[in-house]
Image (cartoon, rainbow, N blue to C red):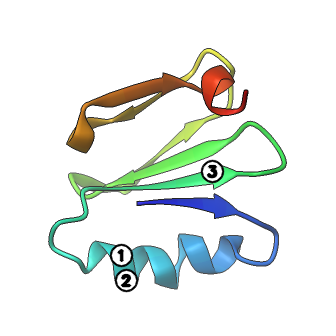
Amino acid sequence: MAEVLSPSTQRYNRGDKRLAYFSLGTLEEYILIAQDKMYVEIYRRSDPDLIEKLDKPESILRLESVDFALTLSDLYE
């Protein structure tokens, strides 16, 4: 599941909404994408205490659950 962050929704997306999505048994990764700057957060069921933060053009967004990878420069192109 991926969400695009906005100033009015980012707190909810990181909190209650993230918890609700992870209550779904099949969700493995939750991705938050900033709309106003190059920044992505990845939450994974496999390590719920770790937040992977990406903010460089050469950073690679990897979604293990669907075998997908993309650089941030391509994502924000």
Sequence order check, earlier mark of 3 and 2 = 2
Question: Type of residue at label 1?
Answer: Tyr
User: Is residue 46 or residue 3 the one in the foreground?
Assistant: 3
Residue 54 at x, y = what percent? 59, 34
Of the 4 image quadrants, the one containing the C terminus is top right
Mark drawn on residue 77: none
Image position of 75 (left or right of 49) = right
Sequence order check, earlier mark of 1 and 3 = 1
Residue 41 at x, y = what percent? 55, 48
Q: In the rendered view, would you say 52 is above or below 68?
A: below
Q: Are marks 1 and 3 in contact (CB under 8 Å)?
A: no
Q: Which residue is mark 2?
A: 20
Of the 4 image quadrants, the one containing the N terminus is bottom left
Instruction: Determine whether the residue tagged by mark 3 lies in a helix, strand or loop.
Output: strand
CA separation in Å, label 3 and label 2: 18 Å
Question: Type of residue at label 3?
Answer: Ile
Residue 23 at x, y = what percent? 25, 80
Mark drawn on residue 21: 1
Q: Are marks 1 and 2 in contact (CB under 8 Å)?
A: yes
Question: Type of residue at label 2?
Answer: Ala
User: Is residue 70 or residue 55 the one in the foreground?
Assistant: 70
Residue 72 at x, y = what percent? 62, 27
Q: Which residue is mark 3?
A: 33
Image position of 70 (left or right of 55) = left
> Label 1 neighbourhood size at 10 Å, few (<14), some (14-19), many (20+)?
some
Instruction: Determine whether the residue tagged by mark 1 lies in a helix, strand or loop.
Output: helix
CA separation in Å, label 1 and label 3: 16 Å
Image position of 42 (left or right of 41) = left
